[in-house]
Image: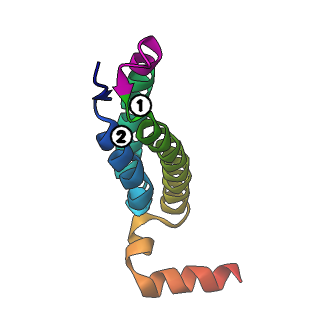
């Protein structure tokens, strides 16, 4: 019997990479990709566990899952930092470099 490729194995890997690369988009975009990759990876791993001799491509799924977990952690950290900066300095201050410079000089 010929082995089939696990469904979405390449997509899981790509979404895991995208979740890390887009962590600087205020943490939202990468978080979405990371969660989707993690859910798809868990489904693929369960499918592989039922019939391991039938499927191929588990390495892509496991790598994508690890990348998704790393991406989720990075995105949550960046999201929390963004929320902290906006609540501390205000959105208007973050948009105006001169005003931000004045605030930073006050803290020194």
Extreme residue toward the front, this view: 1
The stretch drawn in magenta includes residue 52 = yes
- Is residue 97 or residue 46 the one in the foreground? 46
Mark with earlier residue (2, 1): 2
Horizontal and vertical percent for residue 5?
Answer: 30, 31
- Residue furthest toward the right? 108
Quarter in which the C terminus is drawn: bottom right
User: Which quadrant of the figure has residue 52?
Assistant: top left
Task: Please give left or right for residue 74 compared with residue 16 in the image.
Answer: right
Q: Does residue 85 belong to the magenta stretch?
A: no
Q: Position of residue 18 (x, y in %)?
A: 36, 54
Local secondary structure at mark 1:
helix
Q: State the SS at label 2.
A: helix
x and y percentages locating residue 11 in the rendered image? 29, 42
Label 2 crowd bin: few (<14), some (14–19), many (20+), radius 10 Å: many
Q: Quadrant of residue 1?
A: top left
User: Badge 1 local density, few (<14 within 10 Å), some, or many (20+)?
Assistant: many
Distance (Cα) linking label 2 and label 1: 6 Å
Identify the residue shown where x is 46% and y is 82%. Answer: 99
Residue found 49% across the figure and 37% down from its top:
62
- Looking at the image, is 100 positioned above or below residue 37? below
Start-end of magenta stretch:
46-55
Residue 72 appears left or right of 104: left
Identify the mark at residue 71; answer none if there is no mark: none
Name the residue tied to disc 2.
12
Mark 2 in CB contact with mark 1 (< 8 angstroms): yes
For the residue pair 98 and 35, the one nearer the viewer reads as 35
Q: Residue shown at 41%/65% (left/top)? A: 91
Circle 1 is placed at which residue position?
A: 41
């Amino acid at each position: 019997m010929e082995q089939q490729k696990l469904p979405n194995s390449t997509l899981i890997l790509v979404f895991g990479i995208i979740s890390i690369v887009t962590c600087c988009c205020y943490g939202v975009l990468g978080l979405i990709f990371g969660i989707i990759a993690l859910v798809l990876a868990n489904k693929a791993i369960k499918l592989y566990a039922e019939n391991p001799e039938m499927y191929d491509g588990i390495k892509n799924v496991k790598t994508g899952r690890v990348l998704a977990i790393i991406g989720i952690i990075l995105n949550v950290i960046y999201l929390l930092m963004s929320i902290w900066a906006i609540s501390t300095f205000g959105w208007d201050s973050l948009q105006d470099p001169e005003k931000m410079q004045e605030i930073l000089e006050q803290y020194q």
